[in-house]
Amino acid sequence: HPRVRRQRQMCKETGYKIRNRFMVDNASCLIGVVDDYKSGTGQTIAYARRKGLELSVIKVSDIASASGYVEKNKRIMFD
């Protein structure tokens, strides 16, 4: 049923946010590898930045352009 599927998806998304905030709240620094700042990873990096954590962020697009890649189904695949 569509309503049940939507509720499951909402619980899953909420669980990820709780986990990510827990990790940030209990960390002294964050190393993140991100390709979309609207993603959960991007939101976690933004939360860590707001909390004042020391950050080291690696952008997938920077790695891909430096090393060559094949984009398949919107995922970056390295040769």
Image (cartoon, grey):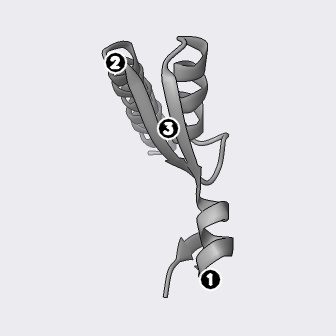
Query: Counting residues from the N terminus, which is met first, the one under dot 2 or under dot 1?
Result: 2
* Residue 1 or residue 61, whichever sits in front: 61
The residue type indicated by label 2 comes to Phe
Q: Is residue 5 left or right of residue 68?
A: left
Q: Are marks 2 and 1 in contact (CB under 8 Å)?
A: no
Q: Of circles 2 and 1, which is in front?
A: 1
- In the picture, the quarter occupied by the N terminus is top left
Instruction: Please give the residue where the numbered disc 1 appears in the rendered image.
Output: 68
Q: Is residue 55 above or below residue 41?
A: above
Q: Which mark is residue 48?
A: none
Q: Are marks 2 and 3 in contact (CB under 8 Å)?
A: no
* Residue 43 or residue 58, whichever sits in front: 58
Secondary structure, mark 2, is helix
The residue type indicated by label 3 comes to Arg
Query: Counting residues from the N terminus, which is met first, the one under dot 2 or under dot 3?
Result: 3
Query: Image point 39% across, 32% down: which residue?
Result: 16
Q: Residues within 10 Å of mark 3 (few under 14, many from 20)?
A: few
Secondary structure, mark 3, is helix
Distance, label 2 to label 3, CA atoms, is 24 Å
* Residue 69 or residue 13, whichever sits in front: 69
Instruction: Please give the residue where the numbered disc 2 appears in the rendered image.
Output: 22
Query: Image point 66% across, 40% down: which residue?
Result: 38
Q: Is residue 35 above or below residue 3?
A: below
Query: Counting residues from the N terminus, which is met first, the one under dot 3 or under dot 1?
Result: 3
Distance, label 2 to label 1, CA atoms, is 35 Å
Q: Is residue 74 left or right of residue 13?
A: right
- Quadrant for residue 25, please give it: top left
Instruction: Please give the residue where the numbered disc 3 appears in the rendered image.
Output: 6
